[in-house]
Amino acid sequence: MTIAQISLFLVRLLAGTGVFLVGVHLLTANIEQLATGKLKELFGRTADKRLVNVGIGAASTALIQSSGVTTVLIVGFVNVGAMSLYQAAAMIMGANIGTTVTAQIAALSAFPITTYIQVLVFAGIMVSMTSKRDGIKKTGLILAGLGLIFAGLALMSDAMKAHRDAIQNLFEVVTNPFLLLLAGVFLTALVQSSSATTSVIIAMSVAGLTVGSGGNEVLYIILGTNIGSCVTALMSSATAGAGARRAGLIHLMFNTLGSVLFFAVLLCWPGFMEATFRRWFPEPATQVAMFHTFFNVACTVLFLPFCGWFVKASERLIREKKAEEPETCLDERMLSSASLAISQLEKELVRLSDTAMEAFRTGYCAFERKDRELIEPTHRLIDRAGGISQSMVNYLIRLSAQSKLADERPISDLHSNLGDIMRIAEIADNFTKYAQKSIDQGLDFSGSVREELGAMVERVEELYALTRQAVLEQDPGLLPRIGRVEDEVDGLRRKLIDSHIQRLNLGECRAESSGVFINLVSNLERLGDHLTYIAYTVRE
């Protein structure tokens, strides 16, 4: 081959690879956005049963066509404490099975009918351009992505066919198993996609090219891609907590041990490919794809009983420090899936509301006990709530920038709820002022008044418990009960103020206490109103 021919070959090969990667990106990104509800439901079914978690990992990866996205999400769940390492280990094994679907799709390029599938590029883009509905637009882009995958594979195969003899002479020289394994690791780490590297190998097979002598050599590259695929999860967990780094390490240990085990088998059995997949499947592309699937399924079957060992090994190698414990439910990894990000925001919202309510309780205790020392702890809790609120606002802004139209309503509700919770923090601050005034002016309230206030506070606490449950469980069935308790809080406000006016008329209360008492009771009613506003953002 001349320099001009080599340059032309590289241009065509890289163009084909680029078209293929664009197709995979379109397919993955749009399936993920359309399937976020299903994805959330899948991850919500995590259990202690290993086979269930393997199935969740495989199904979610097959659904969004990317083991990288799945493992990054798993790392994110571990980082925020929403998933245990035992669950994560089994899911990572399942994700490795799910990722073989892409290779199976690529293997279809060996059949003539896939030439006609490339027309989906045009059909999908036309659907996306002409439709006004977001869901149909996404479906069109998914079809276009599928067509681009086959178009990219065709470009790569054609580029290789044009210079098949020269390329074959080059690949026949490379027979060292260790070198081939490292080539698979390096190429996959470079493009951060084992599916892309495997698909290039499949395109070579379609072009009639073989690696080395045509025996096990191509399988060594596939084993290397499995190790290289760990790079995405390792990079994602590098700056996270100990739990997330352990999940990334488990992924690396599982893939590396499986590859090393099969590497040894292939070294000891030089005729493995000839005796198995080449005999069972006529098309070379199908042989590679089937080995890829068999390898990942076999590794999962072999290592699933040893999930506990992987977890213990990761815990020994990565020590946890108390300072590394997650202090937030938010994780940037979740931003790739709006549904999962919104779910984490709802949990963070509960954490914020817990902090604001704790500030309220501390401020109320400061008033009730006339204890000046409780004022400063109340202010610290208010400041903490302000910090959580700001981080949520920043997260919501980033989520809004990449979310679809269907996600705008829950994002808007979260913004609204943030405002209501920060009003609770302001009410807590008001209670510290009432406490300070009561102390400074020597104001005192009778035992009956304290009992009435205590009854109203109990109703507010009941209202908060119901609202908290409704938000966490997204259960609109609790709304009628929440409405009844809120009516009780309103009724208690009217009753307490009427009773106070009667005591003033009878001379049983000092006039100076009126401002504090009436404002205090009104603030309790406002607190109930804000909790009710939050509860009514929960919908079917």
Image (tube, rainbow, N blue to C red):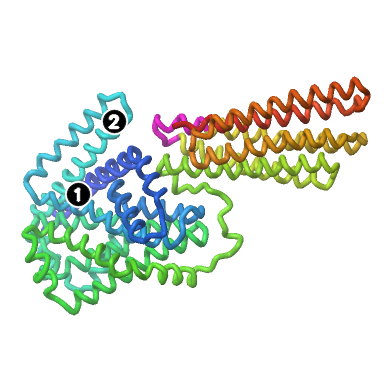
Q: Marks 2 and 1: which is nearer the front?
A: 2
Q: Nearer the viewer, residue 7 or 266?
A: 266
Q: Position of residue 189 (x, y in %)?
A: 33, 59
Q: Is residue 393 above or below residue 164?
A: above
Q: Residue at x 68, y 35 (%)?
A: 459
Query: Dot 1: few (<14), some (14–19), or many (≥20) neighbours within 10 Å?
Result: few
Whether the magenta-drawn stretch holds residue 411 is answered as yes
- The residue identified by callout 2 is 137
Q: Nearer the viewer, residue 255 or 172?
A: 255
- Give the numbered dot on residue 11: 1
Q: Residue at x 36, y 45 (%)?
A: 39
Mark 2 belongs to which amino acid? Lys
The N terminus: image quadrant: bottom left
Question: Magenta segment range?
Answer: 401-413
The C terminus: image quadrant: top left
Q: Image quadrant of residue 467? A: top right
Q: Position of residue 67 (x, y in %)?
A: 32, 54
Q: Nearer the viewer, residue 62 or 6?
A: 62
Secondary structure, mark 1, is helix
Q: Image quadrant of residue 439? A: top right
Q: In the rendered view, does 426 fall on the left or right side of 125?
A: right
Q: Is residue 455 above or below residue 46?
A: above
Q: In the rendered view, does 33 fall on the left or right side of 470?
A: left
Label the magenta part by its dominant secondary structure: helix
Q: Is residue 185 above or below residue 118?
A: below
Q: In the rendered view, does 479 fall on the left or right side of 294?
A: right
